[in-house]
Image: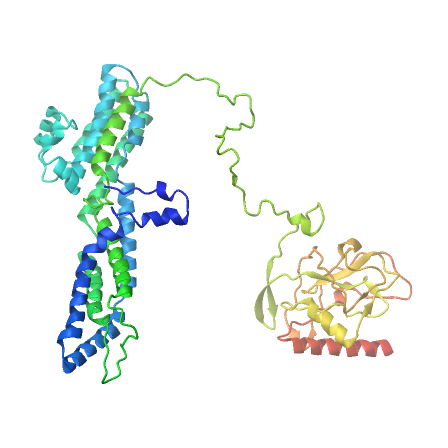
Amino acid sequence: MTITYTLDVSTSSFTSFTKLLFRWRGSIWKSVYKELILWLVFYFGLSCVYRLFLNKEQRAIFEDVVAFCLKYTDFIPLTFMLGFFITLVITRWWDMMRNIGWIDNISLYIATYIQGKSERARMIRRNILRYAVLIQALIYRDISIKVRRRFPTMETLQAAGFMSVKEMEALDSIVSPHRKYWVPAHWAMTAILRARQEGFIKSDHAVQDLLERVRSYRSSLALLLVYDWVPIPLVYTQMVVLIVRCYFLLALMARQYVTSDTRELKTASPIDLYFPIVSTIQFTFYIGWLKVAEALLNPMGDDDDDFEVNWILDRNLQMGLSVVDDAVGKEPPMERDMFWEDSQPEPLYSSDTACAPNNPQLGSAAENDMRDRSNSDVVKMVSRPSEKNIQYDGVSVRSVQPPVFVRSTSHTSSTRSNGLFTRLNCSPVLAVRRKFRQRHNSQMVKETPHEFYIENAHGIANPVPFVACDGVSIGSSIGSYDVIEAVDRLPKAENLIEKGNGNKVEPIKKAEKPEISWQPPQTQEIPADKWYLAVPHKNDDELSDVIEEEDEVSQKNDKN
């Protein structure tokens, strides 16, 4: 039978789950009470022997045995073995439930594909359906003791209406050393082909679909046979059952209350409870856990939670015949539904549920508008930086192409500006911090046109519009407090530095010169191919040394 309690837990509450604890059929109390009573009888028997019938020497031996059992009971991997065994058993149990063999799909296919209201068409539909249920009855009869008691002989199957006398004679006439579960499937497939030949099935595709449904149905039932034939290995089942029983056999001694006036006992308990409360709870949980596995190991038996196989046979035959015969030709006519004119239909609710809240399906990030951060209705899309293999001192370094930083105010300047330094894996904020510490600021030339001269960490220079650098204005200084945003336009790094010489680097040979025709007075033009790359160093101290050396060179040039 199957114990159903789904309605009692339809709402999660303390009372709903508390009521389950007082159920008897299928409960843990029904599973363990006999063994628990037997264990308590032996426990109290040993306790009485220790308290009433042993002398001091015998009590000392008893106490040593208690200490020994208490020490070594923890060596048994009880939780691990039980947990793995239960997982395996429940997986098999649910897989058997999924392949129990429901007739719904195959009956709907039969009623749809085999058309006609004649007696011949009805006969074909009903016989195919009955053959399918007969496959199930033959298999259940061999794997379920409940069905075997219901149908002890083949004649009882014929008397119950699952097959006729001629069909039983045809089944007996087939000589085979094996069980003949396949015979009704063969009859059903032959009847499908005959229906096609007689014109009751309109297409070969329908024939193929029906044959596939019969095959799939038979395969599911055959899997039940395999599960019944090849259970969980006996050695594993024996091991788990033996481990649990041995654990509580040792616990009979290990959980005894012992005390001594002549020596100190490590196992002595400060309270003599007479009744082993904690041990009883542990026994109930572990033995109940094992009973779950024992009950689900063969769900085709007589346990409280086993499958209702007899009801499944009756239901499949009754419902299947109703689908393929009584329901055929009773379909309602096509008509307009009540929402015909509504583009957004709104089904009605009962008055008790109309105000109940609903939680519609909506992505967790669907209502998060990322444009709110920039307070702009325009989202700017840029390409993703590509990875580059950079050769430095003969070593290939794989790095993502770094961002572009403002280098100076234009391609011309009255004095050389160091700008912002960077390296392949170093934040430009470090260079800003170094500049602030050295009190070195680069003043922008006021006469500069609205273009800034930029370069990326590879040393490739390119002019960009003034509007690309929102954090910079004409006349401001690029110094300690200015954080310059990276310009999104990245030039292609066609010319990379291949080797360095100490703190010096090779100049960029093929960098394109910015095409700016305006020439300010009293300025010196610095060609683009003279712009240099800050050498990538191993640590921040080396980077600081490079900055200090370049500052000294810059100051000497200014004095000269």
Q: Position of residue 439 (x, y in %)?
A: 79, 75
Q: Quadrant of residue 135?
A: top left
Q: Quadrant of the C terminus?
A: bottom right
Q: Which residue is drawn at the image coordinates 22% and 55% (left, top)?
A: 32
Q: Quadrant of residue 221?
A: top left
Q: Which residue is drawn at the image coordinates 73% and 75% (left, top)?
A: 547
| Count of marks placed on residues | 0
Q: Is residue 360 left or right of residue 287?
A: right
* Position of 206 relative to 525 (above/below): above
Q: Position of residue 359 (x, y in %)?
A: 52, 41
Q: Which residue is drawn at the image coordinates 20% and 61% (left, top)?
A: 239
Which residue appears farthest toward the front when viewing the image? 52
* Position of 65 relative to 519 (above/below): below
Q: Nearer the viewer, residue 145 or 509?
A: 145
Q: Position of residue 524 (x, y in %)?
A: 86, 67
Q: Which residue is drawn at the image coordinates 12% and 40% (left, top)?
A: 178
Q: Is residue 14 left or right of residue 241?
A: right
**How is the structure coloured here?**
rainbow
Which residue appears farthest toward the top when viewing the image? 118
Q: Does residue 81 show up? A: no
Q: Nearer the viewer, residue 417 or 161?
A: 161
Q: Nearer the viewer, residue 144 or 469?
A: 144
